[in-house]
Each structure stands twice: as C-alpha cells, then as structure tokens.
Image: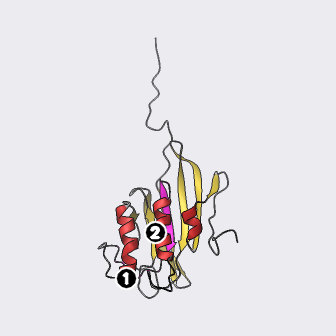
C-alpha cells in the first residue's frame, strides 16, 4: 500500500516507460492510482488513472466530500488521459447523458464540461447498473471496451486503445536523385 492506492493495481508490459503520477487532487480522493506512460504519441505521455469511489450516496454526509474530490481529480489529469473507475453512481444514464440524482450530477457535469468521453454505456454490474467508467480525454483514445466475463459483482472489461502514432508515421521517404 502506497498512498491511497489500496486495492488498485496497474500492470505495465515490460519495456514500457511508466512512472507513478501524483498530485494534490489524487491524494485528496479516497482510492486513486495514476501513472504516466512516456512516449505515447509524438513525445506526449499518456495518463492512466484507476479509481474507486465507495458505494455511498454521492454528495451525502457519508460520502464525506469524496465525490467532489474525485471530480477535482478528473479535472486535474493531464491529457491525453484515461480513467478506469468504479464510481458507484448507478443513477447516471451515460447513453442519455442524464441523471436525476443531485450528487451524481456533479460527476456527469464534470465529464461533460471537460469534454471527456464515457465509453461504457451499458450495465457492468450484476444488478444491471452501469457503475463503471472508462473515460478518456480524447474521444478516439479508446477504440473498444468489451465485457469478457464477471469477477465478483462487476464485469471484467477489456479496454483497447488506439495505437500510438510515431513521429515519422505518414512521412514518405523520397530519394534525392540530384
């Protein structure tokens, strides 16, 4: 356990240059873990964050400000960025971009205001709720999200990302016959 990464794990394939990413907003939220993947595209790093918001009513006394802290954390992530999270906000209809729950509306509005894309639109929980977020700061960053089974009460999601573009991709080598 380091900081607030209890129960969260980020696995990086050998050869990838990955470093823990930390800021005040990440430390303020209950359970968040983030890394930066160097050299993602054209010298940019990709931010990958995992988060868990306990199943307490968003915005309630029991929530103790955690929903607001999670929203500040989302806004603080440098792009391009991906957030994979169990946010426990069952009232959000991501397909319609709507909720009637006041506390959960904050999360929906933060995602909308920052132009983040939610890639999970259907149920991911055994009770038929969409509690999980696979969000990205760029709409084409995530190319596919697929449920590949169930672990505990949640679906196991396989997430595919667009391939990084190398700096010289698209440049054609032309011989100089001079």
Residue 80 vertical placement versus 25 (above, below): above
Name the one closer to the observer, 2 or 133: 2
Q: Quadrant of the N terminus?
A: bottom right
Q: Which mark is residue 91?
A: 1
Q: Which mark is residue 152?
A: none
Give percent across and percent down for residue 151. Answer: 56, 81
Give percent across and percent down for residue 4. Answer: 63, 71
Give percent across and percent down for residue 9. Answer: 63, 69
Give percent across and percent down for residue 59. Answer: 43, 81
Picture colour scheme = secondary structure
Q: CA distance from mark 2 to mark 1?
A: 17 Å
Q: Residues within 10 Å of mark 2 (few under 14, many from 20)?
A: some
Which span of residues is magenta-colored?
78-95
Q: What residue does disc 2 label?
A: 71
Indicate whether residue 90 is drawn in magenta: yes
Name the one closer to the observer, 43 or 166: 43
Residue 78 vertical placement versus 89 (above, below): above
Task: Kindly identify the residue that appears in the image at 39 percent across and 66 percent down.
Answer: 111
């Amino acid at each position: 356990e380091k900081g607030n990464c209890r129960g969260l794990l980020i696995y990086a394939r050998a050869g990838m240059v990955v470093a823990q990413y930390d800021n005040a907003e990440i430390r303020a939220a209950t359970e968040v873990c983030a890394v930066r993947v160097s050299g993602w595209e054209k010298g940019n790093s990709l931010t990958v964050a995992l988060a868990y918001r306990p199943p307490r009513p968003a915005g309630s006394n029991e929530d103790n400000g955690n929903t607001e802290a999670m929203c500040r954390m989302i806004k603080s992530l440098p792009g391009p960025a991906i957030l994979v999270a169990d946010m426990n906000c069952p009232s959000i209809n991501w397909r319609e971009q709507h909720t009637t729950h006041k506390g959960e509306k904050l999360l929906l509005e933060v995602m909308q205001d920052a132009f983040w894309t939610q890639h999970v639109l259907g149920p991911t929980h055994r009770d038929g709720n969409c509690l999980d977020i696979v969000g990205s700061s760029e709409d084409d960053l995530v190319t596919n999200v697929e449920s590949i089974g169930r672990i505990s009460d949640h679906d196991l999601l396989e997430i595919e990302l667009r391939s990084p573009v190398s700096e010289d991709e698209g440049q054609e080598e032309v011989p100089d016959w001079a």
